[in-house]
Amino acid sequence: MQKVIKLSADVPCIIFKHSPRCDLSHLALLRLAENWDFKPEELEVYTLDVIAQKDLSQLVADTFDVYHESPQLILIRNGECTYEAAHLEITITDLKDNLDSPGLFQ
């Protein structure tokens, strides 16, 4: 977790929490993938399997003060969650809007 916090001072970090057993998680991931046009240096992306990594998933929720959901996209900047979305609210458009508006929590 400290790695993400430290790195987020230099590059925005995304944590995508998902369940491999959930159709909604799969749909959210597909929607992101089909519109993904970020360069590797623009974002650091972490995926988290909420079933296999249950303790880590809860640590993420506690550390960044977000309610645990799956699927969930969490944007970390300067060690803090600046945006989070869950389920079908996860969109590239909203992610880009929040990357362009640092410090706004929506």
Image (cartoon, grey):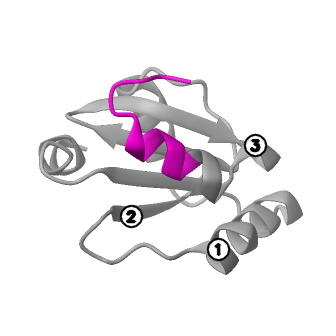
Is 30 colored magenta in this rendering? no
How far apart, in angstroms, are the residues tagged by discs 3 and 1?
15 Å
Instruction: Name the residue that disc number 2 marks.
Output: 45
Disc 3 and disc 2: Cα gap in Å? Answer: 18 Å
Residue at the spot 77% in from the left edge and 69% down from the top edge = 26
Q: Position of residue 6 (x, y in %)?
A: 12, 44
**Dot placed on the residue nearer the N-terminal end, 3 or 1:** 1
Q: Is residue 91 visible?
A: yes
Q: Which residue is mark 3?
A: 89
Q: Position of residue 63 (x, y in %)?
A: 35, 27
How many C-alpha atoms fall within 10 Å of the one at disc 1: few (<14), some, or many (≥20)?
few
Q: Nearer the viewer, mark 1 or mark 2?
A: 1
User: Which amino acid type corresponds to the residue marked 1 in the rendered image?
Assistant: Asn
Left or right for 21, reference 6: right
Residue matched to label 1: 35
**Residue at the image point whose x is 74% and y is 68% from the top:** 31
Residue 64 coordinates in the image, percent (x, y): 39, 27
